[in-house]
Amino acid sequence: MKIFSAQQIYDADKFTIEKQQISSDVLMEQAATKLFEWIHARLRGTKVQIQLFCGIGNNGGDGMVLARLLHEHGYTIKVHVVNYSDKRSKDFLLNLERLKEVKVWPDFINEDSDLPEISPNDIVVDAIFGIGLNRPPDGWVGNLIQHINASQAFVLSVDVPSGLPMDRSPWNPVHVIEASYVLSFQVPKLVFFLPETGVYVNEWELLDIGLDTEILDRTDATYQLVGRQEILPLYRPRLKFSHKGTYGHSMIIGGSYGKIGAVQLASNACLTTGSGLVTVFVPECGYQSLQSAIPEVMVLTDEDERNISKITLPFVPDVIGIGMGIGTEEKTAKAFGNLLKEMKAPMVIDADGLNILAKNPKMLKDIPKNSILTPHPKELERLLGKWNDDFDKLEKAKAFALQHDVVLVIKGAHTIILYGDKGFVNTTGNPGMATAGSGDVLTGMITGMVAQGYEPLHAAIFGVYLHGLAGDICASQQGYEAVKASEICKMIGRGFMEILSPPEVEDREKG
């Protein structure tokens, strides 16, 4: 699903109006009707007070139409116009007059107005600012937003939480609506998925307001939201007349004294995701535990008892997953550097493999083509340096991925995969996956998918989605706190089954 910028959404509105030969207020009526239908389907005339806070732009115009529809269906409403400017959109003014025609008289909140009383039992509709916000809210409007946030009422935001800009972090973090639910028009917004801005969106849902499909289809988007519909076409089914060699030979390299478990998790995940063969290269201290824990893997060892100091491979693997628990000792870094120069097979580089690259940036030029890097936020910072906000981070990360011709997997609540000038935002996963070893499992999974012949970008997108889905299944059975990396690995097969024939997976993808 495409994620549009604010300008692309405005362009889609304009195209729809011109092609369908409708006026802008008709499109506003369509949008607000969808809002009303969503609310009415859930409340069915319940006697609860709904307080609507409307700005004086088109977002406020949506709120005016919604207020009229709620009033006409017998709901108890209070309408507040947040009078932050002398400039008013024509559709706001038109719908303000239509609201007055049905004998609803909004109160106007100005800089010197008292803050309205809001009960925790009320429902608040936030229609103050929309996607066009390009400057900080005035201080008194920010105070009103804080007042709404402190009310403990259920807050429903129209399109985006008010005070949240579309292309940067908020000017003042406390002057943004903390939405209980966001009903967003037609396409998701990137701010829903970034750490600094996604915190203002508890849950969200899209409403189809009738934007023309021609403009939606032909508009190129920098970012896409990845759900099951985007994953299913990537799936490569197993062939009847195939054997283990058909699905590739993976090499997992990592571990050090006390950190062999990371390699166990990665290699087990690699097998469970479908790699035909998996060989593991570890220090001597990891031999017995790996042979005992995972009989399906083959094990090669370094001469060094505690650390990897020289990597000698007797064959050329299809893909190498490296870095988990490997440490950053000088001899290990040297061995990794030599491997980069010698091997042309794509690599999935994680953990200390990334830290070695950050300490030795000259090694970056030797990364094999089509490799995949999987940093968590701190590892990413070591690679890129500091960034100003999440948007600056994405620009720096895209430039890095382009420069080094790699797929970059930025791990987080909504993991983002970058390749070239495109980004792919994942929809699966949960807070329970913030646990030791979860990243090692992901590295093994992506490695296993590359081994089977998935293109590296597709392997990263599919692997991240499947990893999150396995974590979601795990959390649904035992709660967030009890999720362990080894349990995530056990649910990979269930994840595949849900992708191919899902029971209720769409519910997880709503946000």
Image: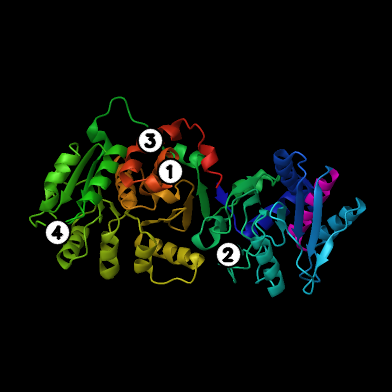
What amino acid is found at the position of numbered circle 2 in the picture? Asp
Judging by the rendered image, the residue that carries numbered circle 1 is 479
Residue at 15% x, 45% y is: 289
Instruction: Count residues near mark 4 (Cα–Cα under 10 Å), then give few for <14, some for 14-19, many for 20+.
Output: many
Judging by the rendered image, the residue that carries numbered circle 2 is 167
Judging by the rendered image, the residue that carries numbered circle 3 is 236
Query: Mark 3 or mark 2, which is nearer to you?
Result: 2
Q: Quick one: SS at disc 4? A: loop
Residue 307, disc: 4
What amino acid is found at the position of numbered circle 4 in the picture? Asn
Which comes sooner in the sequence, label 3 or label 1? 3
Between the residue at mark 4 and the residue at mark 2, the CA separation in whole angstroms equals: 45 Å
Between the residue at mark 2 and the residue at mark 1, the CA separation in whole angstroms equals: 35 Å
- On the image, the x and y values in percent for residue 193 come to 52, 55
Residue at 23% x, 56% y is: 325
Q: Quick one: SS at disc 2? A: loop
Residue at 55% x, 61% y is: 197
Q: Residue furthest top?
A: 240
